[in-house]
Image (spheres, rainbow, N blue to C red):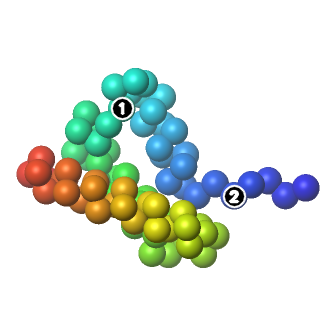
Amino acid sequence: MQEEYRPPLADYWDTLEARYGNGFSLDTISVEELRELLNHLRAAVEQDPLVTPVEKANLGMVLKHAEAVLRRRGG
């Protein structure tokens, strides 16, 4: 049986959740972490053929929100 595919974004998201716990949000992570998250989001949405169209649509909304948070934070 083949394991379920996990894009690099999923592992990075898990790392952030483990680091910040219940305090995890786009406003609480560092600007550097937010930039890294944006890179993973873009790769999943724009380049990863194994991410489904529904997942890409959902992640696209997260990507737009993360971009807005980065702009607001002056990044």
Task: Label 1, secondary structure: give it.
Answer: loop
Front residue of 74 and 27: 27
For residue 2, say whether it is visible.
yes
Where residue 16 sits in the image (x, y, percent)?
A: 42, 36
Q: Is residue 34 above or below residue 46?
A: above
Q: Which residue is mark 2?
A: 5
Please tell me how crowded label 2 is: few (under 14), some (14-19), or many (20+) other residues with Cα within 10 Å. few
Residue type highlighted by circle 1? Phe
Residue at (22% x, 45% y) in the render: 31
- State the image quarter where residue 21 is shown: top left
Q: Residue at x 48, y 37 (%)?
A: 15
In which image quadrant can residue 19 be found?
Answer: top left
Q: Note whether 32 is above or below 40 in the view shown.
A: above
Q: Which residue is rendered at x = 29% and y = 48% of the image?
A: 34
Evaluate if marks 1 and 2 touch, with contact meaning CB atoms under 8 Å apart. Answer: no
Badge 2 element:
loop
Q: Residue 19 vs residue 31: left or right? A: right
- Can residue 39 be seen here? The reply is no
Image coordinates of residue 66 in percent, x first then y, are 28, 54
Quadrant where the N terminus lies? bottom right
Q: Earlier in the sequence, mark 1 or mark 2?
A: 2
Mark number displayed over residue 24: 1
